[in-house]
Amino acid sequence: MSRLRAAALALAIVVLPMQAGAAEQVNVYTYRETKLVQPLFEAFTKDTGIAVNVISASSGLEQRIKAEGDKSPADVVLTVDIGRIDEAVQAGITQPIGSAVIDGTVPPRYRDPNGHWAGISMRARVIYASKDRVKQDAITYEELADPKWKGKICIRSGQHIYNNALFAAYVAKHGEAKAEEWLRGLKANLAQKPSGGDRETARDVAAGKCDIGIGNTYYWALMMNNDPDKKPWAEATKVILPTFEGGGTHVNLSGVLLAKHAPNKANGIKLIEWLAGEKAQQIYADANYEYPIRPGVPLNPTIAGYGKLTADSLPIAQIAAQRKTASTLVDKVGFDN
Ligand SMILES: [Fe+2]
């Protein structure tokens, strides 16, 4: 095992302070950063008296839960991206949530038809455009393959889960042949080999290496508001919410799953329902710069400043079904070469 992989598998166990005499508890396995989820869990414990034990890691949680088998302490899995959500379901470590509250709150297109996962917050995959060099304020995903952008686009690896979901959405919308043609066009427009993360994409637009980059909505807000070193990268760019032709903007989810052998199942469901409630949704919106899954919860002002999000209507489960095809196409067109 490489040192990098060993480091990635190292698990940080954070046990939040138990309430005096609290017998009720729930165990959460999460890929989300502790500092993002801690305020949520503290508020949940305050509201319900249920203590939250958190196991966080950057990879390997599905394998760990699988290895723990029916003795697994995992109740709830909290993760981001339909790719990771789908992997957890495929690993066979989940069970239907079976909550009328979730079914009544989370729109059907952001839930598993079989009930194994539900979206809790959303992010959109959008354009960071140079304020100086890009005059237009609207763009379609289809247009990214137009030769007018030749040598002007920056993006991270085509195999990264965020791009995999966007490309899978393209396959679901237009079919495999059209998606391949589009990916070849997009590849031909790249200013450089896919590299870095979404923040580095903004950095490269700011540095003039490319005119437009593709990134997630929350990174731009984080750079602008929470990271003085990277603020200039946000200041040099504007966010454009792209749409599919005749459709809306590609969104992805942070989601929640109920573990198959959850020892504290009732508390797990309580936590899942609480996360979809108004208080938690406001924390997702303001602390994490995500779009609330619950209708009617106000957006963070920076996120609202991007303009009105019209999310594409394609159910997320249909995007998940095309993940493998998208990944194969990325290899086929040599996207990352
Ligand atoms: Fe991210």
Image (cartoon, rainbow, N blue to C red):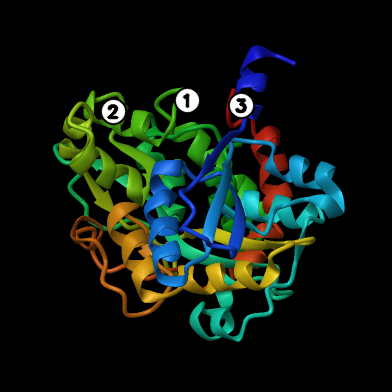
Rendered image quadrant of residue 234: top left
Amino acid beneath label 2: Arg
User: What x and y, as percent, mark residue 302?
Assistant: 20, 55
Which percent across, then down, holds residue 155? 44, 34
Residue at the top extreme of this rendering = 3
- If you read the primary sequence from the N terminus, does the residue marked by circle 1 or circle 3 appear first? 3
Specify the amino acid type for callout 3: Ala
Q: Quadrant of the C terminus?
A: top right
Q: Is residue 147 left or right of residue 283?
A: right
| Image quarter of residue 61 | top right
- Whether residues under marks 2 and 1 lie with C-beta atoms below 8 angstroms apart, the answer is no
Q: Please tell me in which quarter of the rendered image ligand 1 is found.
A: top left
Of badges 1 and 3, the one in the foreground is 3
List x then y, in percent, for residue 277.
42, 75
Q: Is residue 159 above or below residue 105?
A: above
Q: Residue at x 46, y 54 (%)?
A: 142
Mark 3–mark 2 Cα distance, whole angstroms, equals 26 Å
Above or below, 82 relative to 329:
below
Quadrant, the N terminus: top right
Task: Write down the residue under mark 2.
Answer: 203
What count of labels does the image hold? 3
CA gap between label 2 and label 1 equals 12 Å
- At x 33%, y 43%, the residue is 219
Dot 2: what SS? helix
Q: Which mark is residue 195?
A: 1
Q: Secondary structure at mark 3?
A: helix
Is residue 130 visible to us here? no
Towards the viewer: 216 or 105: 105
Secondary structure beneath dot 1 equals loop
